[in-house]
Image (cartoon, rainbow, N blue to C red):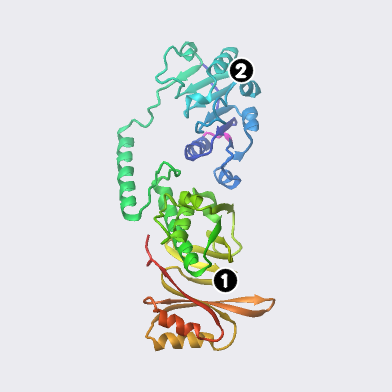
Amino acid sequence: MQGAELRGKTLGILGLGRIGLEVAKRAKGFGLDIIGSDPFVSAAVARENGIRLVTLEELIAGSDYITLHVGLTPQTTGVINAKTLAAMKKGVRIINCARGELIDDAALVEALKSGQVAGAALDVFREEPPKNSPYAELENVILTPHIAGSTGEAQEAVGIQIARQVRDYLKLGVAQNAVNLPSLSHEEYVALAPYIDLAGRLGGFLAQAGKGGIEAIDLVYSGTLAEAKTELVRNAAIAGLLEGSENVNRINAASVAEERGIRVHEQKQESHRGGAATVLTIELHTAKGESRATGTVIHGEQPRLLEFDGIDIETPLEGNLLVCRNLDVKGVIGRIGTILAEHEVNIGNFALGRERAGAKPVKALSVVQVDAPVSDKVLEALRSIEALLDARLVKLPEAGY
């Protein structure tokens, strides 16, 4: 009646989604060396969870225990088969709590009988419930029904989660578990919500202050956004960019963009060149040229613009914003303030940035937050300033998401 210690052995986790990462957290306590394989997970995410990222072939050859946590796709169907079993260490043990179709049953039965596989624990089967299963006669197999979630506590948690999702959809228009978007846990959604809001505001800002006729959209995520499920962030950005053009929302935004022939490209990077830890950049490619805006969230809830069209500037992304481009000469800012005062427009915030050619500033950007939307008459008065190149009003929601 002897077993084998887990300490010092290698656990191979095939699939590093939410469940695979949770398995890794628990496995650390047993002193296992953890390796993992997943083409859709960054090395940074794996490293932060104490997992050494390897290829599928390396995982198959180097694991003492292999646990499966992938979805069923043409690429993963029968991933455990005669060929991969032969490449494993003699005496490997296999756990499958994902999908029965991931395993070639005949090949695994043969490996269990020959001793190539020392044991298997199976929670899912090709045929459920299993009838006349070849595993039932083997002493080195543990078979369990797939009912780990059937507890009083789990059912209560499901009820709470459903109530939260209905609430969030009715209040915020966000469907956390839509069939055409990846599922987010409540904790993941709470962490991501400020950046979903930021993306919508940044998209709305670009749509109103940038150039029209969108041909392509580039989104760059850095910091913690680079490790998150960003589909809702992406869709919020697209919805902000297309707001007012048609019925577009955070669920159908990507489909609407595809229907319009707008190419959407996403890039994730570990850090941003500026001081902010987590940053979103949206770049528009239009028939009239490119336009780019970068933003972040400060204090966990306040959206901020950090850069617009190559000019560094920090200003709140909320309320009524006057976006003014001008030559960097004396007197322009004074004239803007004077004209607004003459029209009884109160300034809430005034941000200024400068574009340089070498050491010499040549252009400037002002983003003026005002208490109420300004009229076309005020905009015309501003545009009459000789050195002013452009003045536009951008209307964004007040703070809160």
* Crowding at mark 2 (Cα within 10 Å: few <14, some 14-19, many 20+): some
**Which residues are the magenta region?**
30-35
The spot of residue 329 in percent (x, y) is 59, 86
Question: Quick check: is 128 in the magenta stretch?
Answer: no
Looking at the image, can residue 196 be seen?
A: yes
Residue at 68% across / 78% down in the picture?
Answer: 359
Compared to residue 390, the image places residue 64 above or below, namely above
Q: Which residue is mark 1?
A: 312
Looking at the image, can residue 281 be seen?
A: no
In the displayed structure, does residue 188 sit left or right of residue 226? left
Total marks drawn? 2
The C terminus: image quadrant = bottom left
Question: Quick check: is 32 in the magenta stretch?
Answer: yes
Q: Which residue is mark 2?
A: 116
The spot of residue 208 in percent (x, y) is 47, 68
Q: Secondary structure at mark 1?
A: strand
Q: Secondary structure at mark 2?
A: loop
The spot of residue 102 in percent (x, y) is 52, 26
Residue at 61% across / 39% down in the picture?
Answer: 52
Given residues 389 and 267, the one toward you in this image is: 389
Residue at 59% across / 39% down in the picture?
Answer: 39
Q: Name the kind of residue labelled 2 in the image.
A: Gln
Given residues 257 and 357, the one toward you in this image is: 257
User: Of label 1 and label 2, which has the lower sequence position?
Assistant: 2
Nearer the viewer's eye, disc 1 or disc 2?
1
Q: Which mark is residue 373?
A: none
The spot of residue 103 in percent (x, y) is 53, 23
Compared to residue 394, the image places residue 31 above or below, namely above
